[in-house]
Amino acid sequence: MTVTELVPYEDALASYDPVMGLEVHVELGTKTKMFCGCSTELGADANSQTCPTCLGLPGALPVVNAVGVESAIKIGLALNCRIAEWCRFARKNYFYPDMPKNFQTSQYDEPIAFDGYLDVQLEDGEVFRVEIERAHMEEDTGKSTHVGGATGRIHGASHSLLDYNRAGIPLIEIVTKPITGAGERAPEVAKAYVAELRELIKALGVSEARMEMGQMRCDVNLSLRPHGTETFGTRSETKNVNSLRSVERAVRYEISRHAGVLNAGGKVVQETRHFHEDDGSTTSGRIKEEAEDYRYFPEPDLVPVAPSREWVEELRATLPELPRVRRNRLREEWGVSEHDMQSILNAGAVDLIVATTEAGADSAAARKWWMGELARSANESGTELSALPITPAQVARVAALVAEGALNDKLARQVIEGVLAGEGDPDAVVEKRGLKVVSDDSALGAAVDEAIAANAAIADKIRAGKVAAAGALVGAVMKATRGQADAARVRELILEKLGVEG
Ligand code: ADP
Ligand code: MG
Ligand code: ZN
């Protein structure tokens, strides 16, 4: 094997124009499998969720899952696709131990949805249109575990274990048309596309689309062509990339690698490649020079799918607001910059903030707590914001206590800390920890007198008219009351006692 010299990214882009194709598999969140009634619940004992159909036993007959078809149509519609009036499933024939039927039930030349597009927003706000070739229905394979080797790969293993619980879980594969014109932003476009698609799938409620759990995975096709030429170069296909960051890195790496091959006068091999998280590289997988012969033919055991136009229109009417549109709407409602909105998105805080405002907080307060104190806390414990043991309703209650003057920010932080520590609802924490702003004069008077006595020089300055110096005395009182005093009232009391006008 010859080692390719990687060309620095900018140099590669100076000579070549990248062309990408993204194939995304989404596991649908249906209760049962695509062609049988077996449960899709995760975490069950190996092979406990199987039946003659998904094990491919002779004579077993598949039945299409209507929710699977409905989900496929919703995805197609949300991607601005045309929905087939009539289409069939097809058998994709190949042998592999994780597929007991010896064929995968898929769709070939008759996908349920085709010819669409998805507009994705780049970090600077620019919108890039990615055209969709098709979205089709198929089923997942089982899962192999290779035992006995050092790496967990089949190479070096002594034996393999097979779990067919996943075999037959519905998948939708969404394939883009070749993406051209992204230039140096190709990695960003790829990442933004997969991110947008994931948000869309979640908004449709058809899957949780959790990439880290394999519910959504992306194959990254990439080729380069010299600037000014039309013909596409030979592509590589990096399989099963399973995070947004990895999609971006895989595109970047392949651009540098292809440029290296081409600059050295070599030919890019059409092959599948594996992506490595640790160093962001890809390595050769399976050569794909000739199209594999899967001997596709229409599935004889399933009736064609012919969704009525009435049904399609009914489903269209249920589509939620597109994530990109919703984000832009919220950004305007909240009056935040693109940059701040991006941070909110990256923190996974949009829905939490919305829920907090729905529970009565104003959006500025909701943002402040989720993006401040709570983001810090999530960061420290290495969890997601949504996994913190505090609800939007509890955050809204803290915000309400601040708004009515019962808590100041410092006390509110302690209340949040208490809720996170499992001490109960905000009101319970306030009660147990005795966290209330003290504003009645009898309670504050003594502390103010002490502060004046202990800082005679400052008190004199204030008497002489230097009102700004009152801040130091307010600080002393706040310290003495462990932050519980009503700062505004303390200031008034100080000025009163010293006989000056605020
Ligand atoms: P396969 O089944 O071999 O993966 P598909 O047609 O399903 O082929 O998917 C190929 C993907 O790669 C599509 O997204 C397609 O738009 C894209 N593509 C096709 N040719 C090229 C090319 N030369 N360079 C980059 N992407 C390509
Ligand atoms: Mg492919
Ligand atoms: Zn089954």
Image: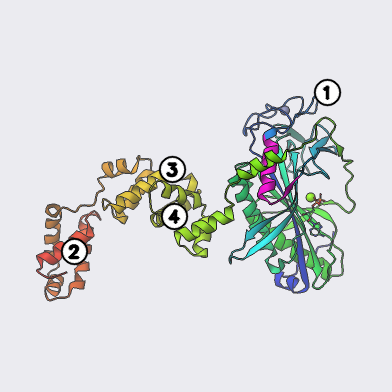
Main SS class of the magenta portion in the image: helix
Q: Is residue 209 shown to the viewer in this render? A: no
- The percent coordinates of residue 86 (x first, y second) are 79, 40
Whichever of callouts 3 and 1 sits on the residue coming sooner in the sequence is: 1
175 part of magenta stretch:
no
Whether disc 1's CB lies below 8 Å from ligand 3 is answered: no
Q: Secondary structure at mark 1?
A: loop
Report helix, strand or loop for mark 3: loop
Instruction: Kindly report which numbered mark, 4 or 2, lies closer to the viewer in this rendering.
Output: 2
Residue at left offset 65%, top offset 49%: 78
Check disc 4: other Cα within 10 Å, few if <14, some if 14-19, many if 20+.
some
Labels 2 and 1 touching (C-beta < 8 A): no
Q: Quadrant of the N terminus?
A: bottom right
Left-right relation of 166 to 442: right
Marks 4 and 2, Cα distance to the nearest angstrom?
Answer: 31 Å
From the image, state whether disc 3 or disc 1 is nearer to you: 1
State which quarter of the image contains the C terminus.
bottom left
The tag on residue 376 is: 4
Q: Which mark's residue is nearer the viewer, 1 or 4?
A: 1
Q: Is residue 16 above or below residue 247?
A: below
**Is 94 left or right of 21, judged from the image as shown?**
right
Q: Which residue appears at 71% of the width and 41% of the height?
A: 309
Question: How far is the residue under mark 3 from the one under mark 1?
Answer: 51 Å
Residue marked by disc 1: 59
Give the residue pinned by disc 2.
491
Q: Are marks 3 and 4 in contact (CB under 8 Å)?
A: no
The x, y position of residue 263, in whole percent, is 82, 71
